[in-house]
Amino acid sequence: MVEPGPRILAVTGSLQQQSVTRVVILHLAKRLEESGCAVDLLDLKEEPLPLYNPDTAHLQPGFEPLRARVNAADVFVLGSPDYHGSIGSALKNFLDHFWHEFAGKLFVTVVASHEKGLTVTDQLRTVARQCYAWTLPYGLSVAEKVDVKDGQVASESLKQRLEMAVRDARVYGALLAAQRRADLACSDPCFMAKLRKLHSK
């Protein structure tokens, strides 16, 4: 019997209609679901967020339902286009809405870029680190017209890396989720200790 995989929130951070980022996120989501993970899709084109304002974000009508989805996730598959070597604004705005909800969880990064997306991947790792989250030690870089054609993942090299990411997200996501639950429940000194009161409410 296959053990159930971790809960995944797969976020498409591109607003473009014909989005390479979206193609890859949907491909990953399908493969993660087939591997036994529970997958929740958040497409920021279809479910846009207001620009983050720390004074009013928690008052927005859609905030609490979204926070519940973020809290429920063990792994975040984050897709962004590379805009001027930086995270796309839609994804950055989503990330700005949360912090302790990410702590102890796993980020999987997907960047659509003409230049390998290394700076965007590093910026997403920085966000993860500041939120006490983990990232896979590699990012997934996607080149338009090379890796994606006619709305489908086309290149064998990307398909292989996506399969590796599916396996690693499932395995390490489950390990981290179990340890996170244990750390929140125990009294040991650890980086999750400061979040115990928040998660006991």
Image: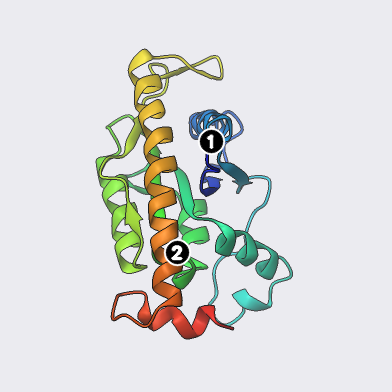
Above or below, 84 against 31 in this view is below
N-terminal of the two: label 1 or label 2? 1
State the residue at coordinates (58%, 60%): 72
Residue 181 x, y percent position in the rendering = 46, 67
Confirm or deny contact between disc 1 and disc 2 (CB under 8 A): no
Q: CA distance from mark 1 to mark 2?
A: 26 Å
Q: Residues within 10 Å of mark 1 (few under 14, many from 20)?
A: few
For the C terminus, the image quarter is bottom right
Residue 189: which disc? none
Residue 37 x, y percent position in the rendering = 55, 41
Amino acid carrying label 2: it is: Phe
Viewer-proximal residue, 54 or 152? 152
Task: Give the secondary structure at mark 2.
Answer: helix
Residue 23 x, y percent position in the rendering = 54, 28
For the question of whether residue 105 can be seen, the reply is no
For the N terminus, the image quarter is top right
Please give the residue where the numbered disc 2 appears in the rendered image. 102
Please give the residue where the numbered disc 1 appears in the rendered image. 2
State the residue at coordinates (40%, 34%): 167
Q: Name the side, left or right, on which 56 lies relative to 171.
A: right
Above or below, 121 against 148 in this view is below
